[in-house]
Image (cartoon, rainbow, N blue to C red):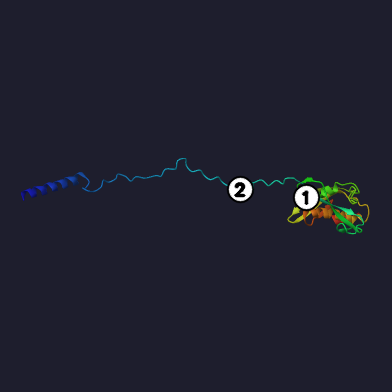
Amino acid sequence: MQRFAVLTLAMGAALILGGCTGGTPYGAPPASSSAATVTPSAPAGGETAAPSPVPTSNLPEPTVLPTNASVITYFIAVGDGGTAGPLVGCGDSAVAVTSPSVSFTDPVEAALRTLLASHTEQLGQSGLRNALWQSTLAVTSIDRSGSAITAHLDGSLAVAGECDIPRIEQQLLLTAQEAAGGPVAITINGKPLSEALSLK
């Protein structure tokens, strides 16, 4: 009994001393002085930012490259009566003629330029007549607005007689329309084709 009392006193003294010295109670884990902050490290070499797309508004306009090809021009078969081609003039025909290869960026301009370059009354040995042979016309521009096409010609228009008026008109219109694949309006010195011809 005396031994038990001594043991109890010893344990009490140990508890009192532990409380006075601020020791950690038995079995409690040691308190951490501060919380550790973990910062993830960047991958070796780092991440490469994706390149910014180039604004489409700054891209250059596509370049139209010259084409080498034949073009179709129209000449007149006098007195043919529409047998060899569309009926025009005073019972004549407009006949399609394929040119040698030419270089161009606009087919309408190329076809008209080829037609207007001929300054002989007869087309070689073909028997076809060129009602434009005395005219000195040149293509100044081709205007395109949606599906509408206008060919502007400048220069001197020479008409040999009344029957040449419809011949010239159809040579120009059929040549331009063949190249465009559709209707084409033509002006001569700023006037519509029909008006320019009516003054002659």
User: For the residues carrying marks 1 and 2, which lies nearer the camera in this image?
Assistant: 1
Horizontal side of 40 relative to 63 (left or right) equals left
Mark 2 is surrounded, within 10 Å at the Cα level, by few (under 14), some (14 to 19) or many (20 or more) other residues, namely few
One can see residue 56 in this view: yes
Residue 40 location, x and y as percent?
41, 45
Among the 4 quarters of the image, the one containing residue 23:
top left
Is 151 in front, or is 90? 90
Q: Amino acid at mark 2?
A: Pro
Query: Circle 1 — which element?
Result: helix
Horizontal side of 33 relative to 136 (left or right) equals left
Horizontal side of 109 relative to 14 (left or right) equals right
According to the picture, the residue beneath numbered tag 1 turns out to be 107
According to the picture, the residue beneath numbered tag 2 turns out to be 55
Q: Residue at x 89, y 55 (%)?
A: 167
Task: Classify the position of the C terminus by image quarter.
Answer: bottom right
Residue 83 location, x and y as percent?
88, 58
